[in-house]
């Protein structure tokens, strides 16, 4: 399909994001449902060669004028990759997808794999943003969820990132962990803020099917906080971080002014994103409202498909107008600004009131939705109940 000739979601008319999935880990965490593996027979050099080949194949289907504004290395544990391999990928992205000179280039790091020498090499390779998967500063909790690093290593990794020249460092934390109390969660937030990161992602633990945690929960051996206690942890985080200068710009994300994650913001704004690697997902132009597709998850199958000069796509869905409209709301409402209703009208040729007014009328009376300056948004106190709102658009 020639994506350059469609009339809807134009690559030429908007910026794109690039995502590279590195699925390898030293050990898989007990809660993790992402496409990641420990002990894969696929070597890093061969896998990166596959990524480079996928980039070459993918760019053939795109028109001229592609301009990428972000590049995100996710996983898995991409900080296990040799920095020289990351450098090859960044240079290829710049050549094929016109990666902007000021592009945000993020690398997810496990603190156990992030010393000064390694981080310095990643910085020299072109990475300019680090996302540290700390999850907790409590050694007992870290062991309970299967993390391979300690709290001390997390702090050392943050200091090393600063010494390596990174002025944009984020920290991920998880609340509602097994046996975690409100007091323990307060200490987590205090520990994170004491380091002074530019960005904080604060997620509640979700027990996903197929994970060791799901089995433990089924067997009654996973002591998780009650729903009310979990909600209280989230609400405490929003107040605590706001008091320390962090903007609550997305349901689970907080940033210093000017340090929002540009890459993740693209997801919530439905910006086209091209994903490379085993299990990577994309939002591509190709129809008026876009195509969502995903690569095969198995690294060996991924490489085998590419060896035949075939893109390793295992699933693809052309979005209907209804699906795209729903996405615009349940993604855009995650952001503090909400959804620009004039833009929605221009994009889909129908007003919010015409399409969703009746279905959402009670959400306004109960305070779960509000209209402000032409934007539909979730009031701050309603963010914890966001799923009750999003379901109205599905």
Image (tube, grey):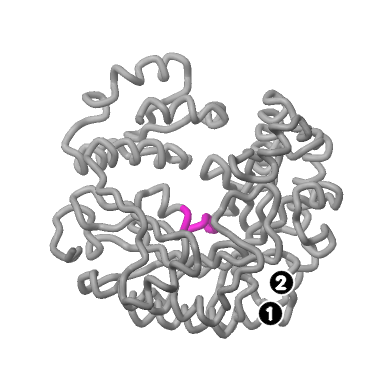
> Disc number at residue 114?
2
Pointer 2 with pointer 1, Cβ within 8 A:
yes
What's the magenta region? 258-264
Secondary element under disc 2, as helix, strand or loop, is: loop
Q: Is residue 141 left or right of residue 380?
A: right
Residue 261 in the image: above or below residue 183: below
Crowding at dot 2, Cα within 10 Å, few <14 / some 14-19 / many 20+, comes out as many
Q: CA distance from mark 2 to mark 1?
A: 6 Å
Crowding at dot 1, Cα within 10 Å, few <14 / some 14-19 / many 20+, comes out as some
Q: Splitting the image into 4 quarters, where does residue 114 fall?
A: bottom right
Q: Is residue 251 left or right of residue 205?
A: left
Residue at the image position 60 percent from the left and 67 percent from the top: 24
Q: Position of residue 336 (x, y in %)?
A: 48, 40
Residue 136 in the image: above or below residue 156: above
Q: Position of residue 181 (x, y in %)?
A: 81, 34
Q: Which residue is mark 1?
A: 118
Q: Quadrant of the C terminus?
A: top left
Q: Position of residue 192 (x, y in %)?
A: 75, 53
Residue situated in front as seen by the camera: 298 or 78: 298
Residue situated in front as seen by the camera: 34 or 174: 34
């Amino acid at each position: 399909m020639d994506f350059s000739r469609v009339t809807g979601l134009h690559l030429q008319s908007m910026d794109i994001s690039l995502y590279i999935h590195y699925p390898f880990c030293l050990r898989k965490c007990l809660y993790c449902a992402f496409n990641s593996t420990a002990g894969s027979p696929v070597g890093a050099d061969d896998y990166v060669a596959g990524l480079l080949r996928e980039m070459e194949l993918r760019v053939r289907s795109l028109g001229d004028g592609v301009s990428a504004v972000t590049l995100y290395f996710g996983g898995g544990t991409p900080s296990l990759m040799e920095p020289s391999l990351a450098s090859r990928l960044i240079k290829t992205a710049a050549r094929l997808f016109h990666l902007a000179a000021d592009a945000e280039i993020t690398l997810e790091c496990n603190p156990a794999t992030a010393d000064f020498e390694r981080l310095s090499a990643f910085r020299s390779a072109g990475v300019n943003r680090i996302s540290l998967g700390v999850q907790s500063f409590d050694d007992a909790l870290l062991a309970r969820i299967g993390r391979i690093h300690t709290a001390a290593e997390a702090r050392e990794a943050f200091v090393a990132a600063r010494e390596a020249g990174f002025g944009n460092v984020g920290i991920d934390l998880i609340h509602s962990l097994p046996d975690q109390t409100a007091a323990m969660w307060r200490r987590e937030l205090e520990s994170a803020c004491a380091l002074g990161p530019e960005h904080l992602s604060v997620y509640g633990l979700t027990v996903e099917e197929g994970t060791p945690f799901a089995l433990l929960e089924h067997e009654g051996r996973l002591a998780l906080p009650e729903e009310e206690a979990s909600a209280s942890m989230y609400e405490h985080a929003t107040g605590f971080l706001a008091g320390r200068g962090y903007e609550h710009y997305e349901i689970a994300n907080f940033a210093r002014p000017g340090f929002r994650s540009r890459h993740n913001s693209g997801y919530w704004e439905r910006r086209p994103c091209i994903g490379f690697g085993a299990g990577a997902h994309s939002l591509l132009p190709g129809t008026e409202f876009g195509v969502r597709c995903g690569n095969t998850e198995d690294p060996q199958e991924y490489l085998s498909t590419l060896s035949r000069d075939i893109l390793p796509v295992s699933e693809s869905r052309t979005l209907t107008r209804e699906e795209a409209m729903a996405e615009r709301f349940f993604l855009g409402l995650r952001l503090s600004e909400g959804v620009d209703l004039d833009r929605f009208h221009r994009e889909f040729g129908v007003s919010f009131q015409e399409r969703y007014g009746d279905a959402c009328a009670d959400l306004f009376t109960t305070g779960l939705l509000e209209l402000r300056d032409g934007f539909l948004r979730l009031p701050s106190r309603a963010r914890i109940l966001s799923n009750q709102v999003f379901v109205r658009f599905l």
